[in-house]
Image: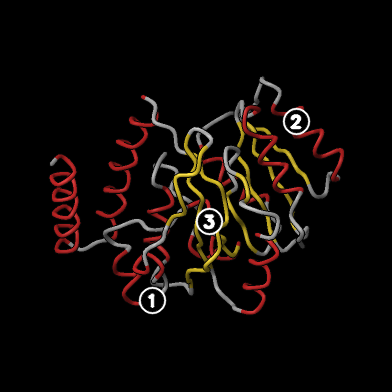
Amino acid sequence: MYFFSLITPTYNSAKFLRENIKRAKEQTFQNFEHIFIDGFSHDGTVEIIKEYQQEMGESKVKIFQYPPKGVTDAFNKGIKHASGKYLIHYCSDESFFNSDVLFKVHQFLSENNYDWIYGKVNVIKGGNSLGIWPQKKIWKLGGTVIGNYILNFFNFIPHASVFYKKEIFEKFGYFDETLTLALDVEYWLRIKDKTKWTFFDIVVSNYGVEETAGSVRDREGYIKNAEKARKKYLNKFEFAIYKLIKFLANFFRKY
């Protein structure tokens, strides 16, 4: 069994994939499998993966193809195929921050028995770094009583920095496939009070953000899906607080 499973959904991802793969190959800790869930790409994505597979071996690099049904479905299929003790959803347009990420995470998890951890990401736009997130101390309190409560109202966890034990999916279920966005928020709200988790102070991934019409629509959809998730887990008083915070944040953003 591998220590890590990297799960990478792909659908016509050739534009980004070589960097994703390059950063995985550069890891000093190589006890991982790299699982690709491909939606029958036709832009050279599959050929890139097969080159990688030929170089590293079929037991380490695995590709499974299914009709595309969205990222939530792909994540869940990847989890089911994974044999690693810990999983990370390593999206095709993301890449590890440096070559020691998996080494340091392995060392930390081997010394501390956490169900899941989160770290930081390097936010990239137009090829340039906008900075490391999260930075404020308050966003690093995950797994504490205060951090667990704050997560009800603010998502301070970068999804590209999260490592999960595979067994928590077997215990608490998979991602909610009725959500195409904010599936991570729903999952964290589902498990945060029932699992042992914490912040690990390491930059895990380079995470790209681009301002396009599509990203604006995605942001609006993300907000709606996140609200749906919070309504499911928060009581009426907590949900009212969440709505007030969101209203005030939008109000002051305009002025």
Q: CA distance from mark 1 to mark 3?
A: 18 Å
The crowd level at tag 3 (other Cα within 10 Å; few <14, some 14-19, many 20+) is many
Q: For the C terminus, which image quadrant?
A: top left
Question: At which x and y percent is residue 55?
Answer: 86, 41
Q: Which residue is mark 2?
A: 48
Circle 3 residue: 161
- The amino acid type, in three-letter code, at marker 2 is Ile
Circle 1 packing at 10 Å, graded few (<14), some (14-19), many (20+), is: some
User: What residue do we see at 72% from left, 29% from top?
Assistant: 46
Relative placement, left or right, of 114 versus 179 is: right
Answer whether labels 2 and 3 touch (C-beta < 8 Å).
Answer: no
Indicate whether 183 appears above or below 101: above
Q: Is residue 136 above or below residue 18?
A: below
Residue 144 tag number = 1
Amino acid residing under circle 1: Thr
Tell me the element at label 2. helix
When the figure is inspected, residue 105 is found, relative to residue 47, above or below; the finding is below
- Element class at badge 3: helix
Give the residue displayed 14% in from the left and 64% down from the top. Answer: 237
